[in-house]
């Protein structure tokens, strides 16, 4: 993925966060968010002109996305190689009112997964946190519950954060990574393959 800020006279790479560089399709919604479809990697979104990409493939059973489209209401449509067309469950441009309490934070699936030997872990802390930030820890455990790494142990402000985890000293297998913010936590699994 490359981007130009001067009408194509010069180009720079814009791949940060893309776990799959086989780009099939690019679309932009009405508020300037860019979405890419990748071969085998699903859909990614950038809200900052391609400087950082976040995975957006929840619910896709076929990550071989061949084309994307966006309608006037901001919904994204993804055409896949074998499973047909998917539609995003929310508009990508509007703010909707919900009666549900918003999530305290969000922990994304690491990429690439499986990893060898490093991977990127993304998480988002919501707005409205205290000015000094919230106490955040991100730890990796083996399946026996033993801590193998502490990636974050700090007070962080709201926003999106990413951490690169280097697993070169670990054996192949399934590992769990756990994000704790104040008194709540989320956990996901990742596979290390050598």
Image: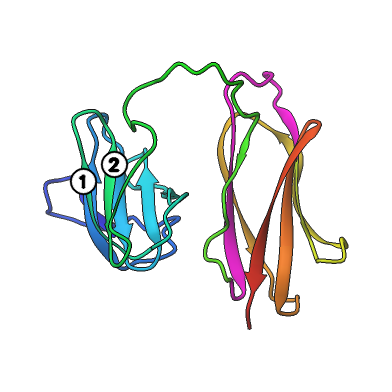
Residue holding disc 1: 69
Give me the residue at 56% from left, 66% from top.
Answer: 113
Query: In this rendering, would 123 be left or right of 94?
Result: right
* Looking at the image, residue 158 lies above or below residue 193: above
Most distant residue in the bottom direction = 194
Secondary structure under the numbered disc 1 in the rendered image: strand
On the image, the x and y values in percent for residue 159 come to 55, 33
Q: Quadrant of the N terminus?
A: bottom left
State which quarter of the image contains the C terminus. bottom right
Whether residue 194 appears in magenta in the rendering, the answer is: no
Question: Where 166 sits versus 154, above or below?
Answer: below
Foreground residue, 39 or 131? 39
**Which residue is pictured at 26% across the width and 34% down the height?**
32
Looking at the image, how many numbered discs can be counted on the residues? 2
Query: Which of the labelled discs sits on residue 180, or is there none?
Result: none
Question: Label 1 near label 2: C-beta < 8 Å?
Answer: yes
Mark 2: secondary structure: strand
Which residues are the magenta region? Answer: 115-136
């Amino acid at each position: 993925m490359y981007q130009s800020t001067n009408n194509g006279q010069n180009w720079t790479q814009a791949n940060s966060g893309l776990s799959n560089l086989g780009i099939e399709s690019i679309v932009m919604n009405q508020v300037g968010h860019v979405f890419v479809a990748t071969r085998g990697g699903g859909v990614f979104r950038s809200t900052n002109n391609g400087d950082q990409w976040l995975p957006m493939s929840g619910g896709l059973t076929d990550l071989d996305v061949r084309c994307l489209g966006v309608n006037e209401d901001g919904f994204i449509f993804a055409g896949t190689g074998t499973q047909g067309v998917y539609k995003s469950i929310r508009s990508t441009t509007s703010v909707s009112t919900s009666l549900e309490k918003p999530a305290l934070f969000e922990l994304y699936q690491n990429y690439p997964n499986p990893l060898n030997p490093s991977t990127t872990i993304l998480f988002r802390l919501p707005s409205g946190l205290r000015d000094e930030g919230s106490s955040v820890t991100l730890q990796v455990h083996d399946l026996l519950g033993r801590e193998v790494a502490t990636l974050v142990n700090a007070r962080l402000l709201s926003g999106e954060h990413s951490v690169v985890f280097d697993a070169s000293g670990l054996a192949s297998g399934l590992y769990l990574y756990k994000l704790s913010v104040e008194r709540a936590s989320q956990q996901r699994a990742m596979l290390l393959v050598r």
